[in-house]
Image (spheres, coloured by chain):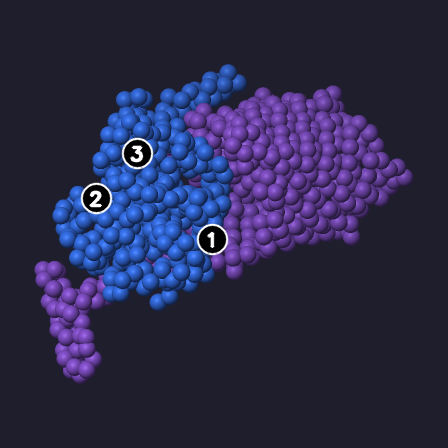
Chain colours: A purple, B blue
Amino acid sequence: MKGIQQIIRRAALIGGLLAAGTHQAAAQAPQPSLEQLDQKVRILERKLEIQEEEAARKKLENPALTAGKDGFALTSADKAFQLKLRGYVQADGRFFLSDDDEKATDSFLLRRVRPIWEGKLYNDFDFRIMPDFGNGSTVLQDAYLGYTASPAAKLRAGKFKPPFGLERLQSGTDTLFIERAHPTSLGPNRDVGLQLGGDVMGSTVNYAVGVFNGVTDGGSGDGDSNDGKDVVGRVFVTPFKNSDIAALSGLSLGLAASAGDQQGTTTVPGLPAFRSIGQQSFYTYKTSTNAADAVIADGSRVRVSPQAVYYYRAFGLLAEYAQSSQDVTKGARSDTLDNDALLVELSYVLTGEEATYKGVTPAHPFDPKGGTWGAFEVALRYSELNVDDDAFPTYADAKKSAKGTQTVGVGLNWYLNRNLKAQVNVDNSTFDGGAADGDRDDEQALFTRLQISF
Amino acid sequence: MNRVLWLLLSAMLMLPAAYAGQKELTLLNVSYDPTRELYEEVNAAFIQDWAAKTGQAIKINQSHGGSGKQARSVIDGLEADVVTLALAYDIDALHEKANLIPKGWQQRLPDNSAPYTSTIVFVVRKGNPRHIQDWDDLVQPGLSVITPNPKTSGGARWNYLAAWAYGLEMFGGDEARVREFLTKIFKNVPVLDSGARGSTTTFVQRGIGDVLISWENEAFLIRKEFGDDYEIVVPSLSILAEPPVTVVDKVVDRRGTRQVAEAYLNFLYTPQGQEIAARNFYRPRLESVAAKYKSQFTDVKLITIDDVFGGWQKAQQTHFADGGVFDQIFVR
């Protein structure tokens, strides 16, 4: 029926064209033949057909609202503008074994509840806003805007992670273990400042350098309490990234450092406290409202952190060392205290997927009806933190604060799909000192996590 | 308590090993326009071959379109395990724009990763009423020439470059005259489809045009399907088209399909794969198969992209980049 209609339509068109030709003077010879007119009509029809196909294709290129495993996004047709809604929730369980005197509390908690708004404007400008409602409080974790002049030159201003700690720079959704290890306690968490960074030399070298307010080791800040600023920089090299040597393409080596002058006060001492893997405080500086007895930051703070990762197929290795040297004062006495920390962690994806710094994407997402269960990964780590011996007894009380801690942990990660992850960790930590009668009790922490991220 | 905990952990570690790999594997082959029939046959044979060797069931999905468009889709996120496109330039883009494959991808498989070749011929209507024998016959006034858009179609770029090579020979390398020659040919092109299969539709199903510039394999398919209504004319000079293939490293490593994807491409080089290619009118690389199908393919003088145009990168930049020669000669 459609074919007949088409023939009738074509005949009418040809008739019209012929009629038009007849009306024109015979002087306008030669007149097109019926065959030529038929071709012209066919060409017009085909062009219309192609235009319709093209219009249908372009319709797909109109501003697109997408929803999927990568989150929800509104993107302009030319992709120059985009607004993404992402986020993640981590529901944790914390249980302390052999904790008969119940110094640590077994609990369920919402560790992180973070909606994320991010996007780009005019292709080259980007932004990100990420509050955190976890732990029963509201904190603005990230709020920054960026400008990408080229892949080698990206500017960022606002509050974000300064380029220092390897494990800290890894997203909280991708860490191998539920809680980060000790080197993270010696670097900045989030700070406000300005950063220039990018990828150079065929993306084999990533660099970042910035000026920040300066926060205590492991700390975050929204403002500043003194005029001193920290300069933070990091170079991260993936030398075989573009080579055909598959066994080396996942090797990266880095060096990060920060330097600045920080001045504390009796109310804001500018010094950190250290927590165990089980998130229990095991080291604090002495505090006092009396200026002569208060321990405060007083001058230079220099941090350095060599770091490395290696991923090959299902195997992963992440290693990080950090040292933080801080000038401190108590009354008339001043010292430079050198604290350091180490982490070595290994992982292996049992189901064969590729291990990466950004986690594991299961080849076969969880689908019991289809007989697939996602990806499973096992992990092992050793980490330690050592406080400078000179901290005792002037700046810290050895009966309350441990001189160091050593942690051995094992973990199992279950990636149900790209958005859901379950983790269980067991970490055993020992301490040097920190108790009235010698060493603080060992900490055996069983942590669990259910995580959804999109 | 600790013993119970370790037992629980051990049990959890055992579970994934027991259940891993039970689901049917899938591969996506993103290819260019006229390879539908070829890969339908290849896929069926490889699925059998793989099952016989490994006992594993797989499913292979196909996607077809203009070669350049297909490459852009993969760059934009289409999860192709393998790409089998019309020309190396389109695959190079996967490295340059998205780093999905390494730079030296073309050296990973024999014959520049092109397991079969083809060339460009003419398809004319029964009896060849416009007496088309060679490229210079395409410039005659009033002729209607069907070829797809070189901006989007790999096949169209081969068509264009074959005509250019002929022009270079005809005019002794005088590029101004070659440009004029191409201008006249494209003045005779009434419709630009986005892909080679679209042009076949225009010529065969919509009945438009006097001659279709076509992949050789596509021309044979037209003959096979529509019989004597069409004739194939082989010009005196054409171009050696080498459609290459590669695994998409980032995708296969993420999906855990590298082993089967590599086996799939290697299968194309086996006697069985080469037979299938020849049956689908692609020129096989394997000498024994090429000898068997020798009578199927007409001998024709074939120039190469490297010899005449200095490789795809240069050819693309000169002729098909925005503002290039094609944009200058094809003005509507």
Above or below, comparing residue A74 to residue A385 in the picture: below
**Amino acid marked by disc 2:** Leu
Q: Which of the two labelled residues, at mark 2 and mark 3, occupies the earlier sequence position?
A: 2
- Write down the residue under mark 3: B284
Quarter of the image that includes the N terminus of chain A = bottom left
Q: Residue at x 24, y 30 (%)?
A: B292
> Alpha carbon of mark 1 to alpha carbon of mark 3: how far?
30 Å
- Write down the residue under mark 2: B221
Q: Which of the two labelled residues, at mark 1 and mark 3, occupies the earlier sequence position?
A: 3
> Neighbour class for label 3 at 10 Å: few (<14), some, many (≥20)?
many
Q: Residue at x 41, y 49 (%)?
A: B72
Question: Is residue A377 toward the left or the right of residue A427 in the image?
Answer: left
Question: Is residue B28 toward the left or the right of residue A232 in the image?
Answer: left
Label 2 sits on a secondary structure element that is helix
Tags 1 and 3 both on a single chain: yes
**Amino acid marked by disc 1:** Gln
Camera-nearest residue between B54 and B267: B267
Chain letter of the residue carrying label 1: B
- Write down the residue under mark 1: B317
Tags 2 and 1 both on a single chain: yes
Say whether residue A331 is visible: yes
Q: Where residue A121 is drawn, which disc sits there?
A: none
Percent x, y for residue A139? 59, 49
